[in-house]
Image (cartoon, rainbow, N blue to C red):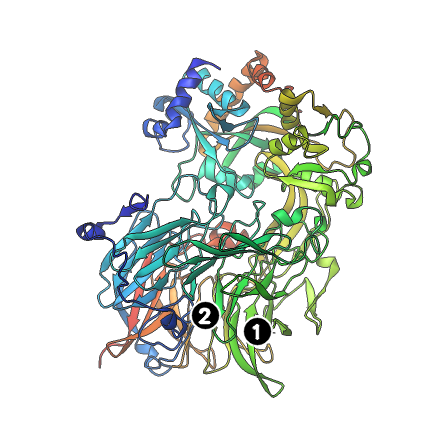
Amino acid sequence: MKRFSTIVALGAIAIAQVGPALAQQAGGPTDADLMASATNTKAVLTNGMGPQAQRFSTLDQINTQTVSHLVPAFSSSLGGEKQRGQESQPIVYDGTIYVTGSYSRLFAFDAKTGEEKWQYDARLPDGIMPCCDVVNRGAAIYGDKIIFATLDAHLVALNRETGKVIWNKKCADYEAGYSMTAAPLIVKGKVIYGNSGGEFGIIGRVEARDVNTGELIWSRPTIEGNMGQLNGKDSTMTGKLNASWPGDQWKTGGGAPWLGGTYDPETNLLFFGTGNPAPWNSHLRPGDNLYTSSTLALDPDTGEIKWHYQYTPHDGWDFDGVNEFIPFDAMVKGKMMKLGAQANRNGFFFVLDRTNGKFISATPFATKTTWASGYTKAGRPIFIDANRPGAPTTTKGSSVFSAPAFLGAKNWMPMAYSKQTGLFYVPSNEWGMDIWNEPIAYKKGAAYLGAGFTIKPLYQDYIGALKAVDPATGKIVWEYKNKAPLWGGVLSTAGGLVFTGTPEGYLKAFDAKTGQELWKFNTGSGVVGSPVTWEQDGEQYIAVMSGWGGAVPLWGGEVAKAVQHINQGGSLWVFKLPKA
Amino acid sequence: MSIGRRQALSLIGGGAAFALAPRAGAAPLDTVIRNGFLSVAVYRDFEPWSWRDAEGLKGIDVEIGELLASALALRVSYLELIPGDDVAADLRNAVWRGSLTGLAPADVMMHIPVDRQLALANDRAVIVGAYYRESFAMACNRERSPDCEAMPPAFKGRPLAAEIDTIPDFYLSSVSGGVLRGDVHHYPTGTAAVAAVAGDKADAVVATRAQIEHGLLAAKDRLVQRKGPLPMMMSPGWNVGIAVKDNSRDLGDKLESVLAQLVANGKVPAIFERYGVVYRPPVEA
């Protein structure tokens, strides 16, 4: 089966006779290497540039003084007739750049020349229906393997030298609406990932598999009442049955942790965000609906929940809680603390004590938050009841204008934390929506009672806003406004720089202290990937994927019309300074 | 079941139909006739309309699709669609764009609600040819719940069945101030919900009328259908029709008139009868 599932790419034919390197570990990154990846400037070994995903590099050859000279070193095409969104973050190791592409493809390029070494195309079944574009957000590297998730909810481990399949495991049923798009996280020899599939009557699960065999080690449901698994046996129930879910709704409550997670070696905790509860209409499920729209802190060895914090209890606006939770250390009231931060869909920037999940602060980073006026000291939102979409009776329920929109003040696109400035750089969007619960939306041929929405920009001149947030105060230190919505990741460096891409096609560099735009380059298609940097032969390189797509053109309503003329693409762009 | 349909279905079994049928995607009438095939999109796992069992693909929509094709002297091929989040996604995938992963759209999609708002919001598709009036109904297990005519609060404490994320689900979860919310058991399909009641797992089910009547066909001795209306049911019912791409209005118009003939000459009602569903003509808008 493994062999048949490999659609051999052109580059791999020549080496197809080489047997798979099964027993021998052909070197490659170890657990220790992955844990130290945030300070390893010679490689990019993990999604997020370190298990904490701070996306900060200590490199400073490219800096506020030199960045204006930055030029392309090479560009490599992902080819193919179909392109669509390229949300990948490159992995760089041992002279090779690995990127995942749309339609579940993985490419290995020579890091010096951009020449393609090999390509792997997952054979996707005809019937998959990915809700929000055919994207992939990146791979994970370990030993002789490079591992990524596919749109039909498989994890595939390839030999990183040859692109041949080592193992291929089905993680969920695509026919039930599951797909997988996030980069896997590897901790202590385990591949850890979350499933997706939001509104199809599912429950979310965080799962861990043996990185060498792909066998399931543990599975942790994200909705209370469901039983976890450990080593093939039932482990413990998540939460307490029916504590915050009525009837049997806990069996289908949503909460998909589809964006994957981060890991903090200091506390030995995994941090996974969970999606919104199902159904949308919150009037049908009184209670907090644990553990949706939350961050869960999990034990990587057993999958037990060590703590949880719920950003939007009893969500009624589709404020998915999956956004990345980034560990960082800072002074709070004169005391150095182990903290974590999340910029939530719901418009608030959260700081928690990452050792126990205790609430420290929540400050709005979007200009408008209509659903809550703030948070109590205990960390509960102060709801504005009039701005919860009304309960539908025999007609459409009352419609409310809500900001942020369900696509979030920040969506999947990862923010960065600079150890140099102590600021978080948050790629955000200023938009709202008309939302209502209604009896006339149709599903599978039948009228169904769900929710309807229309996304609207809040301002005439911009939607996207890259914001530098001070986690100590929640204050916006600077802000860069972009006409089109931002949908790509951010990188910060010790060179005093912040990099991010725009749908207009630019990769841009900003002064990390002031927000002044210092450099830009047009890549030919919208940038929704996450930039990285590393050092090679004494030179600092920057790489980013270009290729417009993702949820905005598919779901964005009025906003989608503003970006409908952007050309599609699929290229890896690599930049460096010219040699003097 | 006619021989012609079996032949067509046997082609589909191994995916051979896709190899033979032109995969150019949705096409106007002239092109469809020239191609010799009518590709018909139906929902997957949607008993009694379109589903697979040991015999293959079957159902009311499957048979109507075949009648439509043969009335135009065409062969039929089917696209079995996994439903998306809403019907707008289904129209996108099955009628005017095709799926993102390269599945070409069909010439016509069965079982699309005929609704003015839905049509206005999806202007790349044309919705025509209403052929049935759907609504919701309730059935009870004869032994477990003898009075199927009781008011909703009387069912408190008894297990009730509904398909997840549908009006029956939300009806049972919200009626009479939500007193039944804790008693609702969710099933992946309406048919599974009806089967739960027939199979003694629940006392009563709310589902589409077609699902209830089709369930009664197999389990009349175990199920009884509620005669009275469902108090506070928010949906008055809706017309079910077909959809084509916006450049294929002539195909839509042709199929609409063919459908009307097939209803008038009793062929469509006869299909419904075989599946146990009482044929109800669409309500004039």
Q: Quadrant of residue B201?
A: top right
- Helix, strand or loop at disc 1? loop
| Dot 1 alpha-carbon crowd within 10 angstroms: few under 14, some 14 to 19, many 20 or more | many
Q: Residue A554, relative to residue B283: is it above or below?
A: below
Label 2 sits on what residue type? Answer: Ala
Residue type at mark 1: give it. Arg
Image vertical order of residue A143 relative to residue A468, above or below: above
Vertical position of residue A57 compared to residue B252: above or below: below
User: How far across and down, in percent of the image, does residue A336 sit?
Assistant: 56, 85
- Give the number of the mark in front: 2 or 1: 1
Q: Secondary structure at mark 2?
A: loop
Question: Of callouts 2 and 1, which one flags the residue occurring earlier in the amino acid sequence?
Answer: 2
Q: Is residue B74 visible in the rendered structure shown here?
A: no
Location of residue A82 in the rendering, given as x and y in whole percent from the top left corner? 34, 48
Find residue A450 and report its horizontal and vertical position in percent: 64, 45
Q: Position of residue A253 (x, y in %)?
A: 62, 50
Query: Badge 2 local density, few (<14 within 10 Å), some, or many (20+)?
Result: many
Q: Is residue A566 left or right of residue A78?
A: right
Residue lying farthest to the bottom in this orientation: A334
Could you say which is closer to the camera, residue A32 or residue A552? A32
Q: Are marks 2 and 1 on the same chain?
A: yes
User: Mark 1 — residue?
Assistant: A354
The residue indicated by pointer 2 is: A53
Task: Identify the residue at horizontal 67%, vertical 63% (top origin).
Answer: A370
Left or right? Give the position of A440 relative to A514: right
Disc 2: host chain: A
Q: Nearer the viewer, residue B239 or A444?
A: A444
The extreme top residue here reads B265
Name which quarter of the figure residue A339 lies in: bottom right
